[in-house]
Amino acid sequence: MRNRWLSLVVGGLVCTVLSHALLAADASQVLVLDLDRVAAELEQDKTIQTTLMAKEQELKERLAKLEEGLRTQIAAKGQEYGPDATDAQKAELQTMLNEAQRSFQQAQNEARQEGAEARMKLITAFRESVTPYAETIRKARGAAVILLKNDLMFSYDPSVEITDAVIKAMK
């Protein structure tokens, strides 16, 4: 629910910024670029996906190793105390278990964050690789603004789309 509201707020801000940009520039000064299609045509989407899958696997393996280590520590302490553990020893085992669960949860959160950062880094690098080509085309056409094609765009004249020109320039 929180993400939905955040998306609506961000979407509203984007619409506001876009409407101001469009008011400042007449329609002939606005171009549209479909980054998803650029990525697909240049197979960068596959490269990004493969890299992210490798990162996800690395994080899963790291978490599995941590989980195994925590289980081993707790099991060793349980074996040390044996079946006739005192109440104090049982409490210590429970404390160890609780601490292990907190550690693992923290590691999961850090792994999610690391995965998200890796994703953003790859996407940012791709966008930065497209920028000089898009800028060259924007300047050549005398436009003031390049908008990214997305779900917020209801309709536009296909003549302002520069996706094919960017793909051709990048190949």
Image: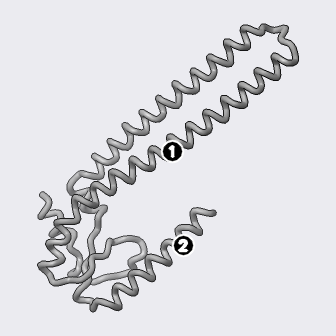
- Mark 1 lies on a secondary structure that is helix
Query: Which mark identifies residue 121?
Result: none
Where is residue 141? Give x, y as percent.
14, 81
Judging depth in this view, the residue of 1 and 78 nearest the camera is 78
Q: CB under 8 Å between callouts 2 and 1? A: no
Q: Disc 2 or disc 1, which is closer to the eye?
A: 1
Image quadrant where one finds the C terminus: bottom left
Q: Residue at x 87, y 17 (%)?
A: 87
Where is residue 81? Give x, y as percent.
77, 9
- The amino acid type, in three-letter code, at marker 1 is Arg
Image quadrant where one finds the N terminus: bottom right
Say above or below: 168 vs 64. Answer: below
How far apart in space, not on screen, are marks 2 and 1 (Cα)? 23 Å
| Mark 2 crowdedness (10 Å alpha carbons): few <14, some 14-19, many ≥20 | few
Residue under numbered circle 1: 112
- Mark 2 lies on a secondary structure that is helix
Q: Residue at x 29, y 64 (%)?
A: 35
Residue under numbered circle 2: 8
- The amino acid type, in three-letter code, at marker 2 is Leu
Pointer 2 or 1: first along the chain: 2
Judging depth in this view, the residue of 45 and 64 nearest the camera is 64
Say above or below: 34 vs 86. Answer: below
Say above or below: 149 vs 60. Answer: below
Q: Residue at x 28, y 60 (%)?
A: 127
Where is residue 76? Give x, y as percent.
67, 12
Where is residue 160? Give x, y as percent.
23, 80
Judging depth in this view, the residue of 54 and 78 nearest the camera is 78
Left/right of residue 96 with respect to residue 61 in the rendered view: right
Left/right of residue 31 with respect to residue 114 in the rendered view: left
Which quadrant of the figure has residue 34? Answer: bottom left
| Mark 1 crowdedness (10 Å alpha carbons): few <14, some 14-19, many ≥20 | some
Residue sticking out furthest to the right: 87
